[in-house]
Amino acid sequence: MTREPQPVVRRVAVVGCGDISALHLAAIATVPGAQLVAVCDVDAGRLDAVSTATGVPGYTDLDRLLDEARPDVVHLCTPHHLHADQAIRALERGIDVVLEKPLAHTRAEADRLVAAAEHSRAKIAVCFQNRYNRPAERAKELLDAGELGAVLGASAIVPWHRTAAYYEDRPWRGSWATGGGGLLMNQAIHTIDLVQWLVGDPIAATGSIATRALAEVIEVEDTAELRIVHAGGATSTVYATVAGVANLPVTIDVVCERGTLHLGAELTARFDDGRVETTVERATASGERAYWGVSHERLIQDFYAGLDEPGAFWLHPAEARKAFDVIQDVYDDAIPDRVMPTPDLSAPAAIA
Ligand SMILES: NC(=O)c1ccc[n+]([C@@H]2O[C@H](COP(=O)([O-])OP(=O)(O)OC[C@H]3O[C@@H](n4cnc5c(N)ncnc54)[C@H](O)[C@@H]3O)[C@@H](O)[C@H]2O)c1
């Protein structure tokens, strides 16, 4: 009698039961062997709703969850100022981590997390899920294959819209202390990551930021423009805003010696010899998901599939740091006398 191999059982917890947690919970449900054992939030209403819907215990304190529910993997879907600290608490216990972007809210916290990840036996993924979008993957394949010749640079546009209510409902998003920045850290970071992934490692960035539409609601930027210099000399420019009239598709145009790539909802590759190749996404999405991308599930499945393999997951904190450092360079350029307020990390977790 032959038996199907049984998947390894992994005990999983989700921390932060807000907007993005729904995508994590849905993705976890597709992973063979992944067993949700606990959820955590400091907001009693959100915690109760998700705990009831999933049928697992809810915790208001991360340390208690880690000690009592003993997860093998923890998904961190919390505000930015908590990312590095919560991830380090899990890594130090040898617990694998799926961390929402950005890896941290300050350079000092990013340093701490990169070091902790390097010293831990546990694995960590940072959610740059758009690298798993099929058109983006194909763009990377074409550039790596070299047929388009040297990459000269890229031009990217993020023309998005966020309402005042988006920030009023979640005040952490509009504050330097808890968001670590605004549009760049929260939205445009995905596009900046794709640009640097496709064009090459960034070595310097300059730029400016402004709060064009939402100054009465947020202290962080809602608009930015920047220029990246990549290793090898290519240069890229990015214009990004959430002060637009609607959420329109992000575009990245990559210029190469022997052709161009236009990456939008789909990829169009134009070779100088006249060939044109189009690559479409595997699945379509609507509403906000169309803008978050459809690939959380693929990233999360890939992470779990490699947990027993040696080595770090490819989207580890040092890799996620490349786009983060571009943003920090822009902030340094735009507001050189910036002093990051120190958030009180103990306050939210103490509600337990
Ligand atoms: N990858 C993507 O495309 C994508 C899309 C949206 C959001 N995000 C990221 O996901 C994260 C969460 O964003 P969101 O929009 O879901 O925010 P949210 O405010 O809706 O959810 C965050 C949740 O964390 C909870 N929380 C706060 N302090 C906590 C603590 N100490 N312990 C446990 N829970 C705590 C809050 O009460 C809230 O319910 C952010 O890092 C954001 O950048 C990523």
Image: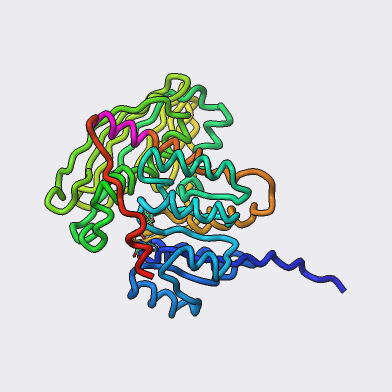
Q: Is residue 331 left or right of residue 230?
A: left
Which range is magenta? Answer: 326-335
Q: Quadrant of residue 21?
A: bottom left
Q: Position of residue 317 (x, y in %)?
A: 50, 43
At 41% across and 69% down in the image, what residue appears? 60
- Residue 12 sits above or below residue 145 on the image: below
- Residue 131 sits above or below residue 199 on the image: below
Residue nearer the viewer, 107 or 92 = 92
Magenta: predominant secondary structure element?
A: helix
Q: Position of residue 337 (x, y in %)?
A: 22, 31
Q: Quadrant of the C terminus?
A: bottom left
Residue nearer the viewer, 348 or 278 = 348
Q: Is residue 235 left or right of residue 244?
A: right
At 23% across and 57% down in the image, what residue appears? 167
Q: Residue furthest right?
A: 1
- Residue 303 sits above or below residue 275 on the image: below
Indicate yes or no whether the magenta region holds residue 8: no
